[in-house]
Image: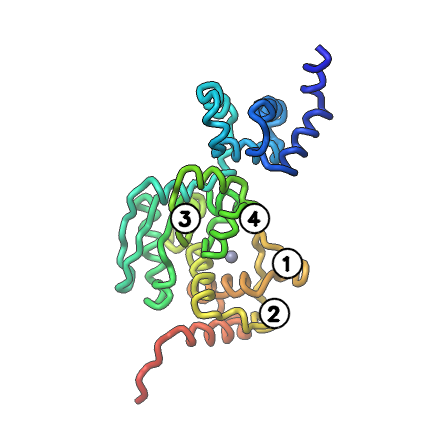
Amino acid sequence: MRTLEASGSAAADRNLSSIVTARGFSELTPERQREMLDCHARHPEDRRVARGLAHLAGSRAFRESDAAAQSAAISEAAIPPRLRSDALRVLNTTEPERIDVNGVPIDVYGANADELETIRTTLGRLPPEHLRTIPRVVVGDTIGHGNNDSGGAWVNEAAIERYESGRGGARNAEAYRAEGWENPPRLELTHESLSRPSVRESHISPTVLHETGHAVDQRYDLSGSMTPESLGGIDYNGRHADPNDPRGPVSERFADGYMRYYLGTLGSDRVAYDTVDGAIARTRPPTSGE
Ligand SMILES: [Zn+2]
């Protein structure tokens, strides 16, 4: 009985968690992985254990030996839904609706009729050059491989590379590789962000504008040449806290400035308005002289 007691003790559980952190769940033996399932049942709130379980779901080695018992264990394990990017599942398992916005066709995955109307109405404020920076739009319960709790994400090539390599806190890249899913650049949105009362009323989504601001910024290299001062009083209050500037990184402050520019609420901040207005002017085709 000594062994059993030890395997259920707090010290043993802490040890299991640290093993996962150090080596990754998929590298554990099936016996160890099963111990981890038990450990998760005892500590459902332990995120390191949950992360290990997410890896488990995609571990081919685990699936191939004693598959029945293991799949039963997996389905009982209750992987927290936020650890998975629902958006990537939606992208790979549903057909898109194609909307035409100012002459630019955009495929939208996972949106209901009301959400589609919000996306169409919001994007309708933007010029074709900006719309063409959006490869596709995906709406899901969770975004950014489940790492991101915000309402949206601009998932570009760099983010995809981070996710697929398991860097940047991607907790379940292995699970997605095992599914064989396509992982192309996309603008992701949560259902939650599109169902806020003010959004449903106006059919204008600040999140759509902020994330598009990132895509436009990347395509035209806009914020790279800006200084923190050039964005005036814009204070980015998102999750990407920057220890160097309490107002947040310039790229996020620009995305917020872009958002407010097209919401029509930036006019009171003269410095930021002039910067964003000047940046947007650089994205437009030159008009013919008089
Ligand atoms: Zn952002």
Circle 2 SS class: helix
Which residue sits at x=44%, y=41%? 177
First in sequence, mark 2 or 1: give its number. Answer: 2
Q: Is the residue under label 3 in contact with that under label 4 (CB below 8 Å)?
A: no
Q: Which residue is mark 2?
A: 228
Please tell me the numbered disc located at residue 183: 3
Number of other residues with Cα within 10 Å of mark 3, as a class: few under 14, some 14 to 19, many 20 or more: some
How far is disc 2 from disc 3 in space, using C-alphas? 33 Å
Residue holding disc 1: 242
Nearer the observer: mark 4 or 1; the answer is: 4
* Mark 4: secondary structure: loop
Q: CA distance from mark 3 to mark 1?
A: 28 Å
In the rendered structure, the answer to whether residue 162 lies left or right of residue 47 reads left
Some atom of ligand 1 lies within 8 Å of the CB belonging to the residue at label 2: no
Q: Amino acid at mark 4?
A: Arg
Residue 264 percent across, percent down from the top left: 44, 66
Nearest to the observer: residue 133 or residue 28: 28
Spatial CA span between label 4 and label 2: 28 Å
User: Which amino acid type corresponds to the residue marked 1 in the rendered image?
Assistant: Asp
Q: Position of residue 49 (x, y in %)?
A: 60, 32
Q: Which mark is in front, 4 or 2?
A: 4
Which element is circle 3 on? loop
- The N terminus lies in which quarter of the figure? top right
Q: CA distance from mark 4 to mark 3?
A: 16 Å
Residue 102 image label = none
Residue at (43% x, 66% y) in the render: 219
